Amino acid sequence: MLIVRLRKYTILTHRWLGVFFCLLFAVWFVSGIVLMYCEFPVVSARDRLQRAPVLDAAKVRLSPAEAFEKLQPADTPTQVHLLTLDGRPVYRFHFGRSRMLVFADNGEVLDTVSAAVARRIAASWTGLDAAATQFLTSELDQWSVLPEVRRAAPYWKQAWLNGEEVYVSQETGEVVQHTTRASRIGAYFGAIPHWLYFTALRKDTALWANTVTWLAAAGSVMSLVGIVVGLWLYSPSIKRYRFPNGRSSIPYAGQKRLHTIFGLIFGLVVFTWILSGMFSMNPLSWSPDSAAEAPVSTLRADSWEERAFAALDPRTVLRAGQYRELELAQVLGRAVYLAKESPDSLSIFPVGSPARDEFDANVIARAISAAAAPYQVAETRRVTRYEPYYIDRHFRKPLPALFVRLNDPEQSIYYVDLKTARVVESYDGRSRLARWLYHGLHSMDLPWLYRNRPAWDITVLALMAAGTFLSITSVVIGWRRLRQKARQANIVV
């Protein structure tokens, strides 16, 4: 009969896909548990600001315009910052992905960061003795495969006996990577196996992305077929399967029985978890990265004009507080200094106007509305706590934020940081769906769970433990199947 043959081949498909992928699934679940608490080491702008020294106004002798003249560039910078490098104030001019630095104390243009300077920068970052460090090769390794670290190459890599390693960009003097012995161990058991972040594979971005996508796709098929098989074989009321100890609704004993029971209960969770992992790779580029760009670009200019800052000297701003970095930006058509005291403390100094704590929400909304024409702003509100489309388990996304929704066909929404007027999150119709298909299903990033931890931890750990147990039964069954086939072929295993 057709139905019998179809069931037979469905079972065979699940069985042999399980043989090939069961170990990978087990690794994914176990490493996922580790990844919940041990992230891949990365240096963020927040980390740099936390470790940066306070800018000394007395050392700043050049205005932004005077520093810019030292470069004599052909292009206009997209961003400008004033910060400290090796104990000296320095202007950092961004030209797309390239950066040029001019020291604010004497106008010296930084050509490259020497090994001696890099040693002092790394020692200051770690708080360790500069004389005790040793330089290592700066070739691509496990901790520099991140795109943002690779773009900073070449760099000076330094290590201490306690296991700390620091990568300093030779172009900008920025610390682009910092690892400890503990963070590397955590990554080896968490992020690296979970993301398949092995150096040989990850250094080829296209190959890595395709590998993860196809493995996740195959795993999704295996899980879905397994659910179909389980439902097909399960007989709750008839109990047609006879065993020595009586009748059963499941035609298996031992590991197969456990596998079937857990598959029936948690199979859908496993399927959606693997499928959402595939969606994280944005297969076939089916989902855009964000909503329309015009409202985003209208808030902050993508070019910098030195004359706009002539009326306010940066030293005047620095004397108003203990600031670690100044960002010279043109926001909503005006030149402003964004003075950063810490990752969570920022003051706004508009040129020609009094200082303020945040930008005017109404002005931001009107600017977005003008840029979105012929569409208009349908809704705005102040966001003071995380919500489904603006959420962060580590509480790093800025609050308060301004929510803006347009009346365009996609119902585009934006979350704007009121401290910097940057769009932090934006969604259109497809990216909202992608948010649930990946983050919602894969990370269970629901506001209620995050706000009531350890509710999130208990929920995710329980589901991950169930997935781990289901995968382990698959490994046992797969091993036994291979050993049986090997014996039939007279192969010693």
Image (cartoon, rainbow, N blue to C red):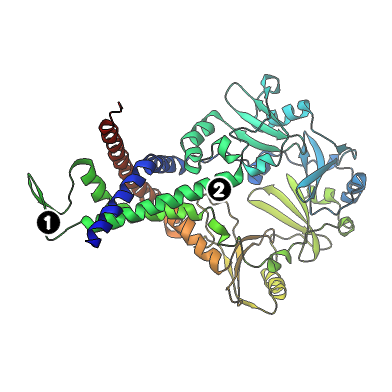
Question: Does residue 48 appear to the left or right of 275 in the view shown?
Answer: right
The image quarter containing residue 265 is bottom left
Q: Position of residue 480 (x, y in %)?
A: 27, 36
Determine which residue is flagged by label 1.
Answer: 239
Q: Position of residue 331 (x, y in %)?
A: 76, 62
- Rendered residue at 65%/29% (across/down): 127
- Rendered residue at 48%/49% (across/down): 214
Disc 1 residue type? Lys
Q: Position of residue 399 (x, y in %)?
A: 59, 58
Decide: is 326 above or below 173.
below
Disc 2 residue type? Ala
The image quarter containing residue 169 is top right
Give neighbour class at mark 1: few <14, some 14-19, many 20+ (Cα, 10 Å). Answer: some
Give me the disc on residue 93: none
Secondary structure under tag 2 reads: helix
| Residue 270 seen in render | no
Q: Are marks 2 and 1 in contact (CB under 8 Å)?
A: no
**Number of numbered discs present?**
2
Question: Does residue 308 appear to the left or right of 274 in the view shown?
Answer: right
Give the CA distance from mark 2 to mark 1: 46 Å
- Rendered residue at 79%/48% (across/down): 318
Determine which residue is flagged by label 2.
Answer: 209
* Residue closer to the observer: 165 or 127: 165
Residue furthest toward the bottom?
A: 374
Which sits earlier in the primary sequence, circle 2 or circle 1? 2
The image quadrant where one finds the N terminus is bottom left
Secondary structure under tag 1 reads: loop
Question: Does residue 120 appear to the left or right of 423 in the view shown?
Answer: right
* Residue closer to the observer: 6 or 55: 6
* Residue closer to the observer: 485 or 125: 485
Q: Position of residue 22 (x, y in %)?
A: 36, 42
